[in-house]
Amino acid sequence: MITTDYLVIGSGVAGLTFAVKIAEKFPKKTVTIITKGTEDESNTKYAQGGVAVVLDSKEDSFRKHIEDTLIAGDGLCDKTIVDLVIKEGPKRLQELIFWGANFDLDTEGNFDLGKEGGHSEYRVVHHKDITGYEVERALLERVHQLTNITVLSHHFALDLITEHHLEYENPKQLTCYGAYVLCEKSGKTLTIQAENTLLASGGIGYVYGHTTNPVIATGDGIAMAYRAKAQIKDMEFIQFHPTVLYNPEGGSSFLISEAVRGFGAFLRDKNGYRFMPDYDERAELASRDIVSQCIDKELKKSGDAYVYLDCTHLDISAFNTHFPNIYNKCKSLHIDISKDWIPVVPASHYLCGGIEVDSNGRTSINNLFACGECTRTGLHGANRLASNSLLEALVYAHNIFKYHCLNDTNLDFVFIPSWDDNGTSITKEHVIIQHNLRELQALMRDYVGIVRSNNRLTKAITRLDLIYNEIETLYKTSKIDTSLCELRNMINVAHLIISQSLERKENRGGYFNIDNIKP
Ligand code: FAD
Ligand code: SIN
């Protein structure tokens, strides 16, 4: 048993930012961060484009950023939240800089601002094309300076502890008392009792297999919150990034940042035809739901596996300065971007929905907060505007911090039973886990992709039930194992995506169902 004042599940931008702020303010309180991989492994680490924020400029304004966010969200954003997040952005960026994050400057010493799809102005602050790496580095450095923070890497959160584990009968209001956590090195299951728990467990990209996300993005936090009966919303809004480097083997794939299109790159079919101006007056810089759906149409029409991103007309030396990581990745694959077009295809990238939270990051369960990509705040609506995600995590980490400064969130002592694994044994059936993982990812890719239909979604539910039953049986009889728990969580997440897709009767933003097309 470990006891802590604040348990933070996840070490990306959301979890680390909250941990730093609360530990700085309350040096006598203990903060425990658990993370299932190495401490830096996260979606955050791979963020390329940057942080969208309005800085002093003649051209830009809060009004324009708010308007761009609302347009991208296709009528489903919560306007109050959009207003709150965007206006708070500059202060949160300054704080990140104060903690040591560096962002690129132009020759006059102003921020070198990038542009991405859906933005009407240049407003994306970045660190070359490895912004997330820089943010993660700076935050971890700050975390290690604070002696009241403990980071437990390779610790996997299994389940949130609520009245369900305390065997209370039908409690009126659920409360979270911490989490059961598997120490991956010792194989032991720990009980971490916490006054307050923050889920900052990131996204779900790996449920689709073909994704820009690293393999840790298995939606564990959302599945845990769902099992604990928290409200989960807008799961049908999966954002597919239009330009992911084509990888014939699928799996986690390298992103070619939207900022490259902001820099002037064109999308072409194999015959060299630039198709985006036919679909949208913003062409390659339409919001990413639109660009992904157009590429999907082109691929279905041609039967090709990918389209191309053409950078050959750009200033390659400037390109290399702005995007050294992308330039070098292409070079390592013998793609010379000064002569060759880059083969690209859309892939799952970001979840706009998730655990429903209020403006203070409070979930529907007492003392359980959530922040970052695992949440549904109302900022993104039906489609997130590029580079609004790091911003959202920074602002919400601050709001949750402020809430704790103003409110007493202490819990009464309760007795928490240890994790019970009586009657289970180490599984010899890893083949079942691997097979079902491949089947789940193929199902999500083929039946629950960019373009959906009621027929495919209904069939997907039927097939998912078979996978669910097989894995639930294995789970109940096996000793806890990370790959089994991740798959179980991915099945929960897939169920939420499919069932909430079937409930949506109109196409909006990133959700497109052929049966919802009005005649
Ligand atoms: P993450 O950074 O994903 O962190 C989640 C953490 O939770 C990880 O440490 C993980 O190990 C841990 N975790 C998960 N499950 C468990 C468990 N069961 N037990 C213990 N720990 C667990 N957004 C932008 O705004 N701008 C960009 O330029 C941008 N570019 C992107 C490029 C790529 C390739 C990708 C993949 C995403 C990009 N995004 C971008 C999106 C953005 O990076 C993420 O939405 C954001 O970083 C999420 O932060 P987070 O802290 O919520 O989650
Ligand atoms: C990108 O750099 O294209 C990703 C930006 C984002 O997802 O916000």
Image (cartoon, rainbow, N blue to C red):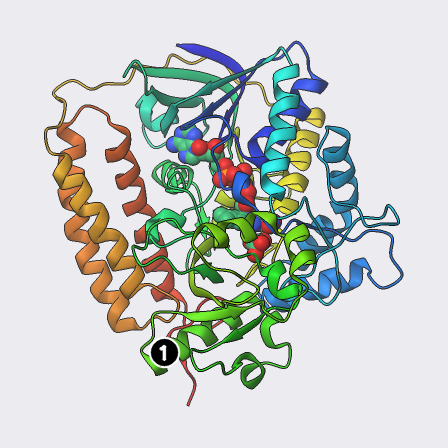
Q: What residue is disc 1 on?
A: 514
Q: Is residue 159 left or right of residue 199?
A: left
Disc 1 residue lies near ligand 2 with CB under 8 A? no
Q: Which quarter of the figure has residue 248? A: bottom left
Give the image location of residue 169, x and y in percent: 31, 28
Task: Please name the residue shown 63% across and 36% down the image.
Answer: 134
User: Which residue is found at the position 57% from the left and 58% from the top?
Assistant: 384
49, 273: nearer the viewer: 273
Q: Residue drawn at (68%, 35%), measured in percent from left and top? A: 398
| Residue 378 in the figure: left or right of residue 177 | right
On the image, the x and y values in percent for residue 376 come to 52, 49
Give coordinates of residue 305: x percent, y percent: 34, 70
Q: Residue shown at 19%/23% (left/top)? A: 479
Closest to the observer: 155 or 77? 155
Please state if 299 lies on the left or on the right of 69 as rendered: left
Q: What's the amino acid at mark 1?
A: Ile
